[in-house]
Image (cartoon, rainbow, N blue to C red):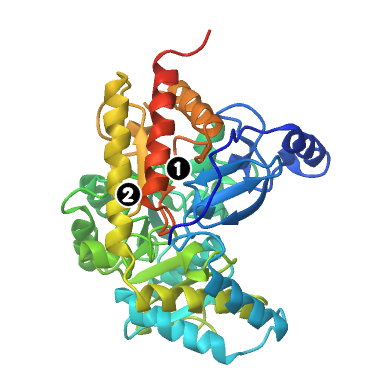
Amino acid sequence: MSETHPEANDGRAGARSRALFERAQRSIPGGVNSPVRAFSSVGGAPPFIRSAHGARLVTEDGATLIDYVGTWGPALLGHAHPEVVEAVCKAARDGLSFGACTAGEVEFAEQICALVPSLRGGMVRLVNSGTEATMSALRVARGYTGRARIIKVDGGYHGHADMLLVAAGSGAATLGIPGSAGVPAGAVQDTLLVPFNNLEAVAACFAEHPDGPEGIAAIIIEPVAGNMGCVPPQDGYLEGLRALCDAHGAVLIFDEVMTGFRVARGGAQERFGVTPDMTCLGKIVGGGMPVGAYGGKREIMSSVAPLGPVYQAGTLSGNPLAVAAGRKTLELITREDPYPALEQATTTLVRGLAERALRHGVALSSHQVGSMFTGFFRAEPVRDYADAKTCDLQAFARYHRAMLSAGVYLAPSQFEAAFVSIAHDPATIERTLDAADGAFAAVRHPAE
């Protein structure tokens, strides 16, 4: 799906974006509705986006940018895919929301369950965001097991529910916030932290907390870390988590809000061959609309009201617009197989970035899983959040500013993954690499 486009433009905030940002700060905290958008770690005002099509954004200042944020992952098909847009428009003509049952949500749930290994033969509940999905899944796991404690990894982000806002990576790390004010100690006292890719630490948690009411209900993990940057699981890690949960009767939850339908049609669990007990989905499952889902084994999901005692509800859950976008997106990735081309384009980009960094003497360690990737500004590979935090953040900031100036839009944080869509054709990848050549030069030899 190539596209016609003008030459790349300087994407730095122009007069219109700067005026909007100044105006926004009078009515919106920090001028943004999600903290990382403020560009605080890379400097300057954020460009305000007017529209997006395919692999490109258009700013309020008229610049056209190659986009590797992709709405933080869901734009697998590129922005404003015509069939997805038409599906949403058709649904909107029949009403925006009913707060009642629809045929579409039944068909959508069937599609999801057919594609995701852990949901085959199980059940799924639609919600409105990834945060809702993870907080609900953990409530279900606690209700199902009758246990209190949960395990999460240091730097793993699973939304902004109180019990999960501890060592949460991503936006909090970008702002230098260790957790969040307003979260009482009691809310996180049953959240146990372990490093990513460290089975010994998980085993030690189970040993310290016996299998009883105060034991461990669940492990929640991004099977491919995305909120400390893209960090893949080491060989045997996911299998080891599966074995530990089986041995102790705990629920293994994969947060596939970022990886679901992204790194493979069936998500990371399909790619790595490890099936969790529960899965959380979001972002891409709604084709870019606000939606999330959680589900798993039938016996576990039977704990959810009205079947069981675990309560969870939402007026807009399964709303027809998000369902229409999600159904069409899943139909498209089932009808065609975008994954080989996506992976090849991403590999070409990642290798090209590594070559150019080496050419300019810039330390860069690159990680890729499918069509998500991160270039870490350090020489050694990143294994966990502690490694990620040793990156040269000033070098990343210079690189980000230079890429934006050359018309390439990246997440304004070293601790975020980047994403390639089917709209990133070879010419777009080559244009990106040309921009990176100059950006790495700027990192190595910053202007005085």
Q: Hey, what amino acid is under mark 1?
A: Glu
- Residue 169 shown left or right of residue 39 in the figure: left
Q: Quadrant of the N terminus?
A: bottom left
| Along the line of sight, the residue nearer the viewer: 11 or 266 | 11
**Amino acid tagged 2:** Thr
Q: Element at badge 2?
A: helix
Which tag is nearer the camera, tag 2 or tag 1? 2
Query: Which residue, given by chain and number where applicable, does mark 2 sit on?
Result: 346
Residues marked 2 and 1 touching at CB (< 8 Å): no
Give the farthest residue toward the top.
Answer: 448
Residue 80, image x and y in percent?
Answer: 57, 64
- Choose the circle earlier in sequence order: 2 or 1: 2
Residue at x-position 49% and y-position 56%: 3
Left or right: where 353 falls relative to 183: left
Q: Nearer the viewer, residue 118 or 248?
A: 118
Is label 1 in a helix, a strand or a loop? loop
Residue 123 appears in the picture as rendered: yes
Residue 284, which numbered label? none
Name the residue carrying label 1: 416
